[in-house]
Amino acid sequence: MAFIVTARKWRPQKYSDVVGQEHITATLKNAIKNNRIAHAYLFTGPRGVGKTTTARIFAKSLNCLNPVDAEPCNECEMCKSILSTQSLDIIEIDGASNRGIDEIRTLRESVKYAPSIGKYKVYIIDEVHMLTKESFNAFLKTLEEPPSHTIFIFATTDVHKVPPTIISRCQRFDFRRIQLDTIKSTLARIAESEKIEIDDKTLTIIAKKADGALRDAESFFDQVVSFCGNTADGEISKIDAATVSQMLNLIDDEMYFRISDAVLIKDFKTVFEVTNIIYENGWDFIDFTAGLIEHFRNIMTVILSGKTDLVETADVYRTRYLNYIDRFSEGDILRLLNFLNKTQQELRYSQNHRLKIEIALSHLIGLEKSSTLSSILSQLESSPGSVPGNLKSNPVQYSNKNIPVAAVKEKVKPDFTSSKASAITNNFQQNIEAAAADFNFDSIIKKWESFAEAVSNEKSLILGPFIKSVKVLNLEGNKLNIASPYEHGKELLNQQNEYITKKAMDFFGKKLIFELTEAGTFEKQPENSGENISEEKPVKPKKENLNDPFENYIINEMGGEEF
């Protein structure tokens, strides 16, 4: 017997065989049971989801001589003639090759004749959007008031190309994209009947490649079976995931897990190993980026929901996704996804995709974890006698976040209604004072030489010599008065303000505002003594508000401003 492709051999012949479109098959069956049959139907949806198949089943059920619960029996004379495409009452027309007005005029004449054997004369027009504008116009009157024995079924993948005047005369049914698990179960049933050994991971690869189209999945299935060949006993060889990935040239999901694991352990070497594998296998870097975005989206779904029901993947990977719970925070995942989305857009305009991906993945792994106010309060509650680690070692994270005072007050206000929360507040105030005690004019003088040397190493051309020539005068709150003989020192300081402010935050643990005096008055400045200067120029008074320690810290210690 000649070979028949899986899509034709396993084409559904009853409503119950159609998968993923239960909302349509149930409606059509009830319409037949209740004798509420319309004169025109429009089936629309993506390719390979069962539009034409459902139209044929509907035509059979309308003309079946022995229907069972509105299902065609597939045994009577009418059903057999339709199955063998020999029925004169079921006419299938290709809209792409019969799109002219002459063909539509011929169709208009033929609808007048009654069916030869069955109850209804059914016209199935596939890809109806290919008809010309003139053809649609010539068809309007016939479509609106056809003979009682005539039914039209239109199928299209581009419903937006069908004129609204045609759509309004039909009952429209939208076919859905078939879910991955549904495709997997269908292929598994076919493989079992065909005595083909295939695992869940391989079925997942084929189903994801099909992208919701069952017909595409069945075509890939045939292709994979042919690629694997037969064993010495004549049986089909076992189909594994590695073979399918090689044949379909798909990126292995293991690559994505290697990247997410590398982000957690800060392993930069993995970047170059993964990109080298992608390059040697000829995989597309744009496809890799899209898959990596989907991978981190799956991680976000598992973290937020605590389960893997919303993740379309093989069962072997579902357990691995669950291992990421409590290892990524919601904020970190959103930052990673936002960065990857920008990288995907930039990659389309890059000439060297491999280099772009290596740089992007290195940045991805280098991103530090972020902390929230809730986590800081939790640390204070668990260790009331110590300053939070992020507050002491990484203050730049807080200086970059312009948190409105009102928002902070609103967020923490409910926490200060109990005696326990009040104790936390007192501890937090004490920790803030302890952290601020280490910051003074003398500490700046001690670290200034190291600060200037670090700036000079990174900005050796212009900014480095300028900082080395600076003379520190005094400190007023968070404003540091300095002097320099450079004539254009103020312009240079303004140009490099963002860099030097961030660098000073790293060294001194507090946001500083640099105030440069005129170059001509450099020699007239008093000696570099914090005590003498403070007597001549009073220190800017700090705003005190003992009722709200968070507001005091944000304004006086972090350089925030009240709106």
Image (tube, rainbow, N blue to C red):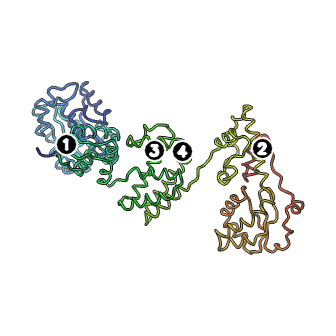
Spatial CA distance of label 1 from label 4 is 47 Å
Residue 237: image tag: none
Of the residues under marks 1 and 4, which one precedes in the sequence?
1
x%, y% of residue 102? Answer: 16, 50
Residue 430: image tag: 2
Name of the residue lying farthest toward the front:
232
What residue is shown with label 1?
Answer: 8
Depth check: give the residue in front, 325 or 341: 325
Q: In the image, what residue type sits under mark 3?
A: Asn
Of the residues under marks 2 and 3, which one precedes in the sequence?
3
Of the residues under marks 2 and 4, which one precedes in the sequence?
4
x%, y% of residue 524? Answer: 86, 72
Spatial CA distance of label 3 from label 4 is 14 Å
Q: In the image, what residue type sits under mark 4?
A: Arg
In this rendering, the label closer to the viewer, 1 or 2:
2
x%, y% of residue 67? Answer: 18, 26
Q: 10 Å neighbourhood of mark 2: few (<14), some, or many (≥20)?
A: some
Q: Quadrant of the N terminus?
A: top left
In this rendering, the label closer to the viewer, 1 or 3:
3
Residue 327: image tag: 4
